[in-house]
Image (tube, rainbow, N blue to C red):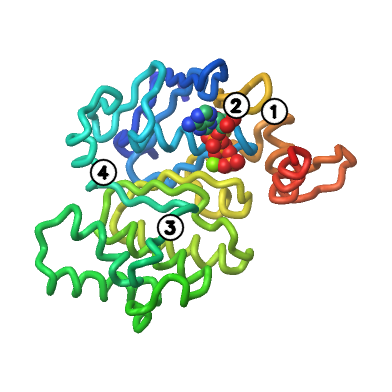
Amino acid sequence: MSAAEPDATLGEPIIEVDSLVRHFGKQTVLNGVSFKVHAGDTFVIMGGSGCGKSTLLRHLIGTEKPTSGSIKIFGQEITGMKADALQKLRGRYGMLFQSGALLQSLTVAENVALPLVEHTPLDAGLIDTVVKMKLEQVGLTGHGHKKPSEISGGMKKRAALARALALDPPLVFSDEPTAGLDPIMTAVVDELTQRLTQKIGATVVVVTHDMNSVFRIGTRIIMLGTGANQGRIIAQGTPEEIRADPDPAVQQFINGDPDGDGVDDTGELLYRDMLLRKL
Ligand SMILES: Nc1ncnc2c1ncn2[C@@H]1O[C@H](COP(=O)(O)OP(=O)(O)OP(=O)(O)O)[C@@H](O)[C@H]1O
Ligand SMILES: [Mg+2]
């Protein structure tokens, strides 16, 4: 297929990032990043620790401003957008983050209600009805009155998912949504996220270093480089294309052979190893 020929498998572009650059002081964290996220994609951003994944996500949400480059969301340029317009746009986002997932002082139900209170004119009775429905969808019926400290890690992630999807958002952002979960609970949360986002027809952008998650949920994937390739996209495509990518940095990351001894460790092990070497 030629570059000019549209790919019939892709939906309309929901996010268009062009030549994004971000410096922090002398450090260039994003270095000419361009990609499109299409309707219905589960778009995965992967790469080693410190490669700029979370920074890129914060630019997409508009909490960080680029040094240069353009970001269009639903066709609107967000880089110069005023705070109130950005806030309005965020009413169409669902957001799932590793840190600060749930407000500890509120109950599970109050957490799930937050986006509804902030972004809709619904009265308390209707909000209560929506919250009950969302809790049921994630298997937390009967747990709404509890505080986050009273439920398990997997339940917290599911409560955060219910909150992220409270507004039936057309676009969902998530950063390491399954961090800290064991592989079985990770699969459960991945599967639930996939099922519920597909049900509402949401496009999903997810940052993860978990190789099982990448290939379980990703429909399109980009990998950001480290070292000399810091802040550049070193691979992009479908899961099949990424698996077949000849770049050794990509293969090492997805197959994980940190010692170069031919032993096929997992990407998770490689990631942990990289963190340990940094300590
Ligand atoms: N606000 C900031 N000020 C200065 N440097 C920053 C800031 N935010 C991020 N950085 C730097 O940008 C680089 C990329 O950080 P980022 O958190 O985006 O990486 P990451 O790929 O999400 O890593 P991890 O997998 O560990 O979460 C790091 O070197 C970090 O120190
Ligand atoms: Mg990060």
Mark 4 or mark 3: name the one nearer the start of the chain: 4
Residue type at tag 4: Arg
Measured in 3D between alpha carbons, the distance from the residue under mark 1 to the one under mark 2, in whole angstroms, is 8 Å
Task: Confirm if mark 4 falls within 8 A of ligand 1.
Answer: no
Badge 3 crowding class, 10 Å Cα cut-off, few under 14, some 14 to 19, many 20 or more, is: some
Mark 3 sits on what residue?
101
Q: Earlier in the sequence, mark 3 or mark 1?
A: 3
Q: Residue 208: image x %, image y %?
A: 55, 47
* SS of the residue under disc 4: helix
Q: CA distance from mark 4 to mark 2?
A: 29 Å
Quadrant where ligand 1 appears? top right
For the residue marked with disc 3, what is the amino acid?
Ala
User: Is mark 1 in CB contact (under 8 Å) with mark 2?
Assistant: yes
Residue 247 has which mark? 1
Between the residue at mark 4 and the residue at mark 3, the CA separation in whole angstroms equals: 17 Å
Q: CA distance from mark 2 to mark 3?
A: 30 Å
